[in-house]
Image (tube, rainbow, N blue to C red):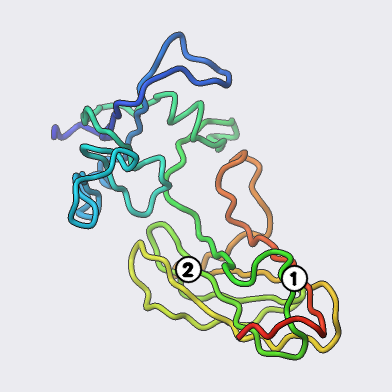
């Protein structure tokens, strides 16, 4: 790669015309770029097999990119071309779509979605699940981050008024989920309760309370409420 290259572009075989404006003048290929430093890291792979077998077509056969720490749209499938560029790539799928609004010198600019934001997710219980009152129920889920490690997860069972620390089930490992659990003694009083989980990373960042509208419908990384019902007739959830 030449010394003045700043990005590496990955182009896939999928080609067509987007359905939502702004529309390009004709059919375009799906293409995304990575900063040179990220593209050259050992963890960024060109994969041709999964679990010892050739990639299935749905997963990008014959070869695809794997870009840990970045959102999935960076891991381009059905690769047909990889090339370096000397100026930032401004393709449709990097600016018009799969992009977000940022500010430079007070003016709005479009930037590409890239590193994953810190996030935690409750997997159990399900939304609107009914739990038995005055029983220990194990709330469980997972948390992850982009280029850093998740170091703490706290859980609220009262809609965010109070928080308590959860227990990790996995060690911290770069680009891997960390599963966690929290044993909750459900209230004696029947009713509706709102559960939330919130993560913290090694840089001291904490999940935001609200969605950043500059990301549009992407990057939903604020704590999502799980509403449950506690009932005297519910079944224990051990």
Q: Earlier in the sequence, mark 2 or mark 1?
A: 2
Where is residue 175? Give x, y as percent.
35, 61
Dots 2, 1 in contact, CB < 8 A: no
Numbered disc total: 2
Decide: few, some or many residues near mark 2? Use Cα within 10 Å; few <14, some 14-19, many ≥20.
many
Residue under the image location 68 percent in, 55 percent down = 210
- Residue 1 located left or right of residue 196: left
Measured in 3D between alpha carbons, the distance from the residue under mark 2 to the one under mark 1, in whole angstroms, is 28 Å
Q: Which residue is mark 1?
A: 228
Q: Which quadrant of the view contains residue 195?
A: bottom right
Quadrant containing the C terminus in the rendered view = bottom right
| Residue 71 drawn above or below residue 158 | above
Instruction: Estimate the x, y position of residue 85 in percent, counting from the top left.
Output: 25, 27
Q: Residue at x 59, y 51 (%)?
A: 220
Q: Quadrant of the N terminus?
A: top left
Q: Is residue 141 left or right of residue 164?
A: left
Depicted 62 relative to depicted 169: above or below: above
Spot occupied by residue 172 in the image (x, y as percentages of width and height): 37, 74
**Relative to 161, is 52 on the left or the right?**
left
What residue does disc 2 label?
201
Element type where label 2 sits in the image: strand
Check the image and report above or below for 107 versus 50: above
């Amino acid at each position: 790669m030449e010394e003045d290259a700043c990005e590496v572009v990955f182009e896939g075989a999928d080609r067509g015309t987007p359905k939502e404006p702004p529309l390009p003048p004709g059919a375009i290929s799906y293409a995304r770029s990575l900063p040179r430093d990220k593209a050259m890291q050992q963890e960024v792979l060109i994969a041709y097999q999964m679990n010892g077998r050739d990639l299935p077509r749905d997963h990008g056969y014959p070869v695809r990119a794997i870009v840990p720490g970045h959102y999935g749209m960076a891991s381009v499938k059905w690769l047909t071309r990889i090339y370096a560029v000397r100026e930032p790539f401004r393709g449709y799928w990097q600016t018009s779509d799969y992009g977000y609004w940022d500010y430079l010198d007070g003016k709005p600019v479009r930037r590409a979605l890239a590193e994953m934001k810190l996030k935690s997710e409750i997997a159990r219980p399900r939304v609107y699940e009914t739990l038995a009152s005055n029983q220990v129920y194990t709330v469980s889920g997972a948390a992850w981050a982009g280029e850093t490690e998740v170091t703490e997860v706290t859980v609220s069972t009262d809609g965010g008024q109070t928080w308590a620390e959860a227990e990790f089930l996995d060690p911290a490992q770069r680009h891997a989920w960390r599963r966690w659990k929290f044993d909750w003694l459900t209230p004696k009083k029947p009713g509706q309760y709102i559960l939330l989980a919130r993560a913290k990373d090694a840089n001291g960042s904490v999940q935001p309370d609200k969605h950043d509208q500059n990301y549009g419908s992407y990057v939903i990384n604020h704590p999502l409420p799980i509403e449950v019902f506690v009932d005297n007739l519910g079944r224990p959830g051990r």
